[in-house]
Image: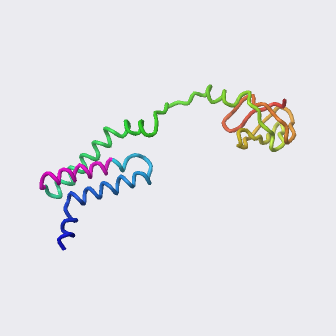
């Protein structure tokens, strides 16, 4: 019976709660739950040092979790996920396609279009001329998910 009382000490409960929250962070994306796990560990540390009531524990948990979330999330997200720009460089994306070769998978008709295979993926394609299936084409432009092509 004494082992159960030892297990139900506040510092152990807060530590285990923090551990569960940190493990949940791996299952649920977003880098939010981890800060509540850290907040629970801070409360566990405070409970280990001093004897405080449940209301004070909850206040410390909420304050530490929210403050760490607001102050550290953006910085940690940059470390773990990498920094990304807010805008794409459209010229860079266009250069990846223009001049490359693709194979016609569905006959391309000038007004209706067709399909080509480029880097293992089928793309919608348009051309100014009719192009038969199996013909090698060159990509001259890209508009969203449609490639403008010409026969070689």
Rendered residue at 85%/41% (across/down)? 134
Quarter of the image for the N terminus: give it: bottom left
Rendered residue at 40%/51% (across/down)? 25
Q: Position of residue 72 (x, y in %)?
A: 33, 39
Rendered residue at 44%/49% (across/down)? 29
- Indicate left or right for 33 with 128 as reference: left
Quarter of the image for the C terminus: give it: top right
- Indicate left or right for 27 with 57 as reference: right
Residue 137 lies in what quarter of the image? top right
Q: Position of residue 32 (x, y in %)?
A: 37, 47
- Indicate left or right for 95 with 25 as reference: right
Rendered residue at 29%/42% (across/down)? 68
Residue at the limit of the structure toward the bottom, as seen here: 1
Q: Magenta part mainly helix, strand or loop? A: helix
Image: magenta residue range:
35-51
Q: Is residue 45 magenta?
A: yes
Q: Is residue 132 above or below residue 95?
A: below
Q: Is residue 76 magenta?
A: no
């Amino acid at each position: 019976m004494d082992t159960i009382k030892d297990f139900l000490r506040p510092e152990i409960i807060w530590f285990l709660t923090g551990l569960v929250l940190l493990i949940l962070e791996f299952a649920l994306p977003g880098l939010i739950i981890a800060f509540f796990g850290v907040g629970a560990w801070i409360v566990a540390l405070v409970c280990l040092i001093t004897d405080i009531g449940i209301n004070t524990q909850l206040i410390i948990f909420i304050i530490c979790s929210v403050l760490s979330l607001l102050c550290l999330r953006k910085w940690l997200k940059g470390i773990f996920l990498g920094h990304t720009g807010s805008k794409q460089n459209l010229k860079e994306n266009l250069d990846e396609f223009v001049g490359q070769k693709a194979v016609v998978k569905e006959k391309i008709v000038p007004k209706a279009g067709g399909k080509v295979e480029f880097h293992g993926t089928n793309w919608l394609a348009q051309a100014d001329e009719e192009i038969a299936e199996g013909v090698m084409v060159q990509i001259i432009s890209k508009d969203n998910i449609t490639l403008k092509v010409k026969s070689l």
